[in-house]
Image (tube, helix red, strand yellow):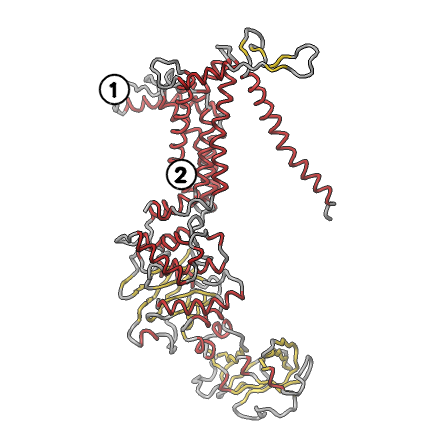
Amino acid sequence: MKPPRFVLARGRFWVGLLPWAWMLLFFALPFALIVKVSLSTPELAIPPYVPPFVMEPGAVLPQLRPDLASYRRLHDELLALGTSGADLQYLSAWGSSLLLAALTTLLCLLIGYPFAYHIARSREAARNTLLMLVMLPFWTSFLLRVYAWMVLLDSSELGLINRLLLAAGLVDAPLQLLYNSGAVLLGMVYSYLPFMVLPLYANLVKLDQRLLEAAADLGARPGTTFLRVTLPLSRRGIVAGSMLVFIPAVGEFVIPDLLGGGDVLMIGRKIWDDFGPNQDWPMAAAVAVTIVLVLIAPIVLLHRHGRTDGRSSGRNAEAGQ
Amino acid sequence: MEPDGEKGADWGAKTGQAYLRIEGATKRFDDTLAVDDVSLAIAEREIFALLGSSGCGKSTLLRMLAGLEVPDAGRIVLDGEDLAAVPAHRRPTNMMFQSYALFPHMTVEANVAFGLWQERPRLTRAEVGARVAEMLELVQMQRYARRKPHELSGGQQQRVALARSLAKEPKLLLLDEPLAALDKKIRQRTQLELVNLIERVGVTCILVTHDQEEAMTMAGRIGVMSEGRLLQVGTPGEIYETPNCRFTAEFIGETNLFRGRVAGGALACGDFPAAIVLPPDAALAAGDEVWVSVRPERVTLSRAGAASSHAPGDANCNAASGEVADIAYLGSHSVYHVRLANGRVVIANVPSVHWGDAPSPTWGDAVRVAWFAPDGVVLTR
């Protein structure tokens, strides 16, 4: 028997409420809190700031007294860009974070695409096994896997890779493998690869085989077919995978901290320093707010991309010929 | 297996101009023979249909011609060139795929241009543009040049797919279930349009279909396939009127099939009340197990006791009495299912005008079915 209509409608209401309530509780409220802290004035107290609004006795509404010093600091750095000798510690942290995240995304894409393509082209029975193998690292703790890299990359003659290189006579002295940007990039690509492979796989597995056959039938060599048909049709997967890698990679803190040396100062590290040792919560919060704002841009772009998909790319058959 | 010595079998070969020659093509998937030693000769500008139910190997054979499947054995020679070692993207063939396989991210124009951009030596932008315009005009889709496939109706997509597969002037056009994705009304209209267009372009064409009407409407000759084998090749008329095996007789149209053993020029048949008189020219040895196929429109129906063109006792006539079990009135004719005394049902198509002003027989009426012996076809397999 079908339940009465109003029961269905009520059920739908509650189901719809859950994600909204979740977002309110665990995103909107904490973010509002961060914004509040970012507009506060640092103070040696517990907590170490003066809130940006004061309740005057007898007043109905609180009086706003936002302190924009933290944002001004970031703004000044932006203005000082290009000036020699300027103190650009936040901006340079931002720069190296974006660069590292971009490199990570690019490498994950280059490595992940063949992964995803191969799995999607495998027999149906084999696909699940292969997918599980891609996700297998998730079964061990993330921290443990990063520590494992430290053991592998150890720069003394005790490091596993160095021992192999020495034993093989390829090097005379152990190489400096750890505590540099290369090690950070390696750790990042290693950790984020599955996030690129999964959305790409989900996209490529839906690719109609007959389109590839049609391209071959029309005279396209395999390389042309890939560039003109497979690649454009997997664009959504590429965009989704890149977002899933890039966005968390920008704020990544643990991997640079463990594998990186003093030369790689990431924005996540700056936030940690300001919240912790420096006791400058408003500065840390302001940086966190800028991260959210900067990362919203690619998400909006992605959204717009998704909407116009199917209309905008009509000329690409001619474009690159 | 060679197709039997049908008139149509080596139509192209006989005129000395076999344009496409398939020799012993065989393809095995795991345990099944998808295509089993198929040989076929096709003349230039011919429209040929491969007809069979799904899984009979017709699509695999077509894909072999396109180079999308590699035959395990056999040769494919097109216009004097052996295609065996030529990969799909270098073959002078183009295929219109089932449900078209248009590139969803490209406009109509770009879809049609896709194959032209692959030509070597390269064509100029102007040459490609001119050819695309010509093709779109041919299928009357100029107005839709900038649309994406998902913005087109099924019939329009079919025309774009056709334009795309004709753009490179292939030596051989391959159509895989060209109209199966369309609904019935559009399909019937499109069949003749498509034939006219292919003939106007003058391209040799092989089409694959499971729809006998489509095959008979569109093709000059038909090859009937079942379980990977090419059973019979002939014109639509030959295939319908003189099937060479039970499969063809039953697959193309309706038929009454009687099984029995040859005894003294007649067929001793368990499920027909009398011995069935065989066509006079049937060369059979006594004791052979054979089948006789009689098309329903060859069976005449008369009321029991009424005078009939087939007099009882006529040595050239097979007749039996029964009663009407079912009638399907189809306008131009009615299909009568007549149950004989022994339970066997004989199907007779009776033109509606046959009864004149007299009332036509109805359910339960006693009737007599009869056919002239020469109207039966003897099948040995």
Given residues B41 and A98, the one toward you in this image is A98
Q: Residue A265: image x %, image y %?
A: 40, 18
Q: Chain of mark 2?
A: A
Q: Residue B17: image x %, image y %?
A: 29, 73
Given residues B120 and B153, the one toward you in this image is B153
Q: Are marks 1 and 2 on the same chain?
A: yes
Q: Residue B28: image x %, image y %?
A: 39, 59
Q: Residue A282: image x %, image y %?
A: 52, 14
Mark count: 2
Please tell me how crowded label 2 is: few (under 14), some (14-19), or many (20+) other residues with Cα within 10 Å: many
Question: For mark 1, what is the residue?
Answer: A172
CB-based contact (under 8 Å), mark 1 and mark 2: no
Q: Is residue B171 left or right of residue B344?
A: left
**Residue farthest toward the top in the current orientation of the protein:** A44
Asked if A37 appears above or below B222 in the picture, the reply is above
Q: Residue type at mark 1?
A: Asp
Mark toward the start of the polypeptide (1 vs 2) = 2
- Identify the secondary structure beneath mark 2: helix
Question: For mark 2, what is the residue?
Answer: A113
**Label 1, label 2: how many angstroms apart (C-alpha)?**
37 Å
Q: Residue type at mark 2?
A: Tyr
Q: Chain of mark 1?
A: A
Q: Is residue B308 left or right of residue A294?
A: right
Asked if A22 appears above or below B265 in the picture, the reply is above
Question: In which quadrant of the rendered view does residue A238 lie?
Answer: top left
- Residue B236 seen in this snapshot: yes
- Identify the secondary structure beneath mark 1: loop
Please tell me how crowded label 1 is: few (under 14), some (14-19), or many (20+) other residues with Cα within 10 Å: few
